Amino acid sequence: MKRFFLLLFVGALILQNVEAKKITIYHKKANATSQKVPAPQQVFPEYSESTSSEVHNLIFMIGDGMGLGHVSMLMIEKGYQPTAFNRAQNVALISTYSANNRVTDSAAAGTALASGLKTNNGMLGETPDGKVAESMITKSIHTGHPAGIVVTCALQHATPGAFYAHVASRKEDALISRQFVESGLDVAFGGGAVAMQEVQADGKTLVDALKDKDYRVITSLDAAADIHSGRVVGLFAENHLLSMLEGRGDYLQPAVNKALEILARNAAVQQKGFVLMVEGSQIDFESHANRADGILAEMRDFDQAVAAAMDFADAHPGTLVVVTADHETGGLTMPSNQQDFTLSESGVDYRFGTKSHSGTLVPVYLYGAGAEQINGIMDNTELSKKLMKLLGLQ
């Protein structure tokens, strides 16, 4: 009888501890917009119809500063319920070092991911000797494929800039903005309105120049509701968009869905595939600040955008979704709060090794067409080259 009651007591403790395992650190500010988090799916198919060897469309998603620790935080805080990352049909690892530094910055890393070529920190779309590093988006546009960019930072920032600009320094916003106008992108959603409003030598602004090229220029995502094809630039902030904790709200996932709608229709007219680059830009910002709650909020937002891309791949065979990072920021780790591992739950602490970037490998998650063709440990330039080969751009 004593043994029976002892077993009941132990069972009750286990149930109590299971309930305690979800650790919540995200505290929404009073002025923040509520996030719409979809109900988790408990079962994911091993492969969907979108998994065919031929790749027509690429959705290249970059969590700026997102290391394995960031993805682990998302999973821990979701109580290990499935995330979009759990849907990945293949996983790889990439190194991120630049041509002149074991720890890269976003300009060099973005250039490597965009073009398959190494460059020095601070250089954007150029090799160390000043030669043009042509990106997969530029190559796509030159071969008649629609292309787009969706970010939560300024469109002139390092990662988006790496996909269309060629400058010796990432700080050359005026030149980057002029190159953006000439990029040929079908869709671009992000911030950076200030640089686009500067008057040029001809007396016009760069916004005027975009309109002269038949772009619709909008200042809110709601204004895109009646836009279903053609060319559109969304300038949604003077510089970077607000962070999630500041109240950005439900922007990234709807922006990705709208960009995909427009690109898919444009691609149907051209009878070719498309390339879309999406960046969860502010994962990096929050990591530089070592704000665990900010990282979690940005990761939850990025996770929803990744889910939207994967859903599109399910509905559009021939679409490959690739989710990776340009580098890791913050040196994020999550040690136990206790050294006594006989305890059923010790809690988890989020600690940072730096307020800068780190040189660790970062993960790559693949879903959809051709996902099985990219494997193992490779350099970021190798990943880019493999993607361009799948798209027939080499």
Image (cartoon, grey):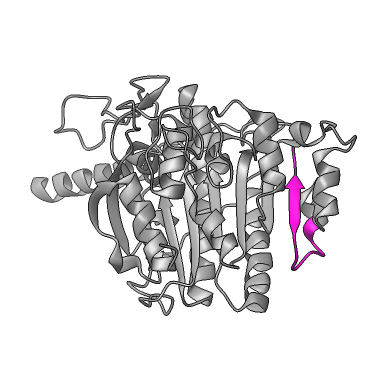
280 in relation to 28, above or below: below
Which quadrant of the view contains residue 127? top left
Which image quadrant: the C terminus? bottom left
For the residue pair 254 and 175, the one nearer the viewer reads as: 175
* 379 relative position to 163: left or right: left
Q: Residue at x 42, y 80 (%)?
A: 49
Q: Residue at x 69, y 66 (%)?
A: 262
For the residue pair 347 and 317, the one nearer the viewer reads as: 317
Q: The magenta stretch spans which residues?
A: 224-237
Q: Is residue 325 visible?
A: no
The magenta stretch spans residue 385 = no
Task: Tell me where residue 157 appears, x and y as whole percent.
Answer: 59, 35
The magenta stretch spans residue 226 = yes
Which quadrant of the view contains residue 98? top left
Task: Tell me where residue 82 appears, x and y as whole percent.
Answer: 40, 57
Task: Tell me where residue 250 appears, x and y as whole percent.
Answer: 66, 48
For the residue pair 114 and 362, the one nearer the viewer reads as: 114
**Farthest-out residue, right:** 203
Q: Residue at x 38, y 30 (%)?
A: 104
Task: Tell me where residue 103 appears, x and y as whole percent.
Answer: 34, 27
187 in relation to 333, above or below: below
347 in relation to 381, above or below: above
Q: Residue at x 43, y 72 (%)?
A: 55
* 348 relative position to 250: left or right: left
For the residue pair 150 and 141, the one nearer the viewer reads as: 141
Provide the major secondary structure of the magenta segment. Answer: loop
Q: Is residue 189 visible?
A: yes
